Amino acid sequence: MIADRKDDHVRFAAEQQRHLGGYNQFDEVSFVHHALAGIDRSDVSLATRFGNIEWKVPLYINAMTGGSARTGAINRDLAIAARETGVPIATGSMSAYFADESVANTFSVMRRENPDGFIMANINANASVEKAQRAIDLLRADALQIHLNVIQETVMPEGDRSFSSWGPAIEKIAAGVDVPVIVKEVGFGLSRETVSALENMGVSVADVAGRGGTNFAGIENDRRDHADYSYLNGWGQSTAACLLDAQGAGIPVLASGGVRSPLDVARGLALGAAAVGVSGGFLTTVLDGGVAALTSQISAWLDQLEALMTALGARTPSDLSRSDVLVHGDLRAFCTDRGIDIRRLATRRRSTPHETTGGIL
């Protein structure tokens, strides 16, 4: 039953978050400290623009859940927190709604609680244009997410086994709906080749959603009678690796997967993301502390992100993509293997106009 699966996903995702190690490849990205780079905080704006989308902040609550009574209550709380903090929000996969319209309320509650917010509907790559439009209409969605989850489906006992139709379906949806289409992974990352293919399909934005956060191969393996896919637990590229791989991509990219702090948000923006999303970390907060705890956390993150931008001399989120960063460890080796020139990342301020960022070049 789909509702049971959705509840399982929440339970296993929360358990994963509580046992995640503290380290991921965002820790292999560091800012070069320039002691005279700081600017006035009053000059900093968190607003971001990308792919005909404008957000007041470069942080969003990414796709999580929906499809059961319990997950509907979670979506309600997430939507209230989004409303109170002004962050955009996405629903979880709406496949349950297509299978059973009686669960529509577990998704539409987001719009009722957040009537003026930016909401993204979320569907799988098997959906038709008609289903995509139904999802958009139910939520009065401002954008449509299409998730790619071939590894999750492979491990899922009842998952899909045919994937060749995904590309053509995405292209039809992108051409057939009148809201921006964002294609995202679910925690295994998007390669530069995939981002390029999405651009050719007419997709507006790519969310790289890399390894480092919720592991859906692990979740689906835990749901099996025999956990015989455990060797896939490390599959995919990290979010930081995906962002570096997608440097200069033809469409805007978003970053999600393994984002643990405002510093990770700043790192994601510095590596080229237009905005940064969080799922698992915010899920555990709302489960443990409710709306008030999540609202407080998001507000604190936005305040601290603005403080970091002030210290780094970034007046806007896009200015962070001109800050100097160093790449270390296995992430550096990934860049070498993929032919990514990371040396220029360490000296970007030298070619940045003085008036764009802080007080030194």
Image (spheres, rainbow, N blue to C red):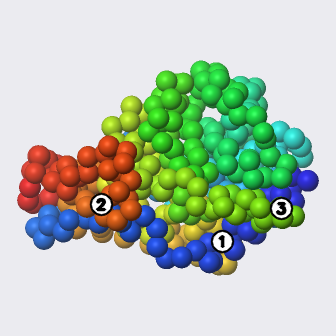
SS type, badge 2: strand
x%, y% of residue 268?
39, 56
Q: Residue at x 39, y 31 (%)?
A: 250
Disc 3 residue type? Arg
Name the amino acid type tagged 1.
Gln
Residue at 69% over, 74% down? 15
Q: Are marks 3 and 2 in contact (CB under 8 Å)?
A: no
Look at the numbered disc 1 and give the secondary structure of its residue: helix
Instruction: Give left or right: position of 69 versus 288.
Output: right
As drawn, is 82 to the left or to the right of 205?
right
Q: Position of residue 202 (x, y in %)?
A: 52, 25
Judge whether residue 36 can be spotted in this image: yes
Q: Quick one: label 1, few (<14), some, or many (20+) residues within 10 Å?
A: some
* For the residues bearing labels 1 and 2, Cβ distance under 8 angstroms: no
Please report whichever mark, 3 or 1, sits nearer to the chain's N-terminal start. 1
Of the residues tagged 1 and 2, which is closer to the observer?
2
Q: Does residue 143 show up?
A: no
Residue type at numbered disc 2: Val
- List x then y, in percent, for residue 67: 81, 53
Q: Which of the two discs, 1 and 2, labels the residue nearer the N terminus?
A: 1
Rounded to the nearest whole Å, what is the CA distance between mark 3 and mark 1?
16 Å
Q: Is residue 336 above or below residue 9?
A: above
Residue tagged 1: 16
The residue identified by callout 3 is 224
Residue at the spot x=40%, y=49% of the render? 243
**Structural distance between the alpha carbons of marks 3 and 2:** 38 Å
Identify the secondary structure beneath mark 3: loop
Q: Do the residues bearing badges 3 and 1 touch, measured as CB atoms within 8 Å?
A: no
Rendered residue at 73%/68% (across/down): 12
Query: How many marks overall?
Result: 3
Mark 3 or mark 2: name the one nearer the start of the chain.
3
Residue designated by label 2: 327
